[in-house]
Image (tube, rainbow, N blue to C red):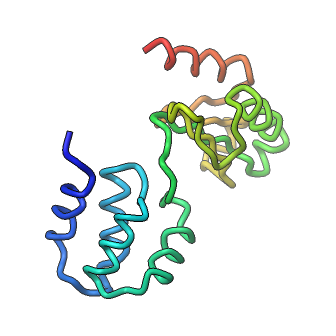
Amino acid sequence: MKEQAETIDEILDRYPGEPRYLISLLQDIQAEHGYISREAMTLVCGHTGVPLSRAWAASTFYKSFSVEPRGEHTIKVCLGTACHLKGGTRLAEGLERELGVKSGCTTKDLRFSLDTVNCLGACALAPVVVLDEEYLPNTNSKKVKQSIKRLDAE
């Protein structure tokens, strides 16, 4: 596996050193490393000439960016209206207890990241949880725990 600094340099080499490439650079670093480290942010700012405060603002504004390491697996619990009415909040609270983390955080072993989202676009299947890319429709705590245990066994 390449060192993070090497891959960041390779990503920087793909773009001219102009401020308009800030988001593209951050997206590529996020895709490669799963998050944007302080070191990566500093290198991007040096390359593009963008102030660190502006890059930080962009990376914390967009939900798709993370400035903290993310888990190997991502769990998203929908809290949109339909999911909320059908128990989405209880699912999220149960997962927080089960995993020992609050929503928006990652387990200490970097195995799971837990997030709540406002809508997954699957209201007819409420409540919905997405585990990595797998939708768990009409789900409950027991089904979600079984899916998590299946991942732990892998």
Tell me which residue sits at (15%, 69%) in the image. 14
**2 w.r.t. 36: above or below:** above
Image quarter where the N terminus lies is: top left
Tell me which residue sits at (57%, 19%) in the image. 147
Query: Where, by quadrant of the figure, is residue 122 drawn?
Result: top right
Tell me which residue sits at (57%, 71%) in the image. 61
Count of numbered labels shown in the rendering = 0
Query: Where, by quadrant of the figure, is residue 30 drawn?
Result: bottom left
User: Residue 112 at x, y = what percent?
Assistant: 55, 34
For the residue pair 97 and 122, the one nearer the viewer reads as 97
User: Residue 22 at x, y = what percent?
Assistant: 34, 77
User: Residue 56 at x, y = what percent?
Assistant: 50, 74
The answer to whether residue 47 is left or right of residue 77 is left
For the residue pair 87 and 55, the one nearer the viewer reads as 55
User: Residue 26 at x, y = what percent?
Assistant: 36, 67
The answer to whether residue 87 is left or right of residue 5 is right
**113 w.r.t. 54: above or below:** above
Image quarter where the C terminus lies is: top left
**33 w.r.t. 130: above or below:** below
For the residue pair 14 and 41, the one nearer the viewer reads as 41
Tell me which residue sits at (62%, 15%) in the image. 146
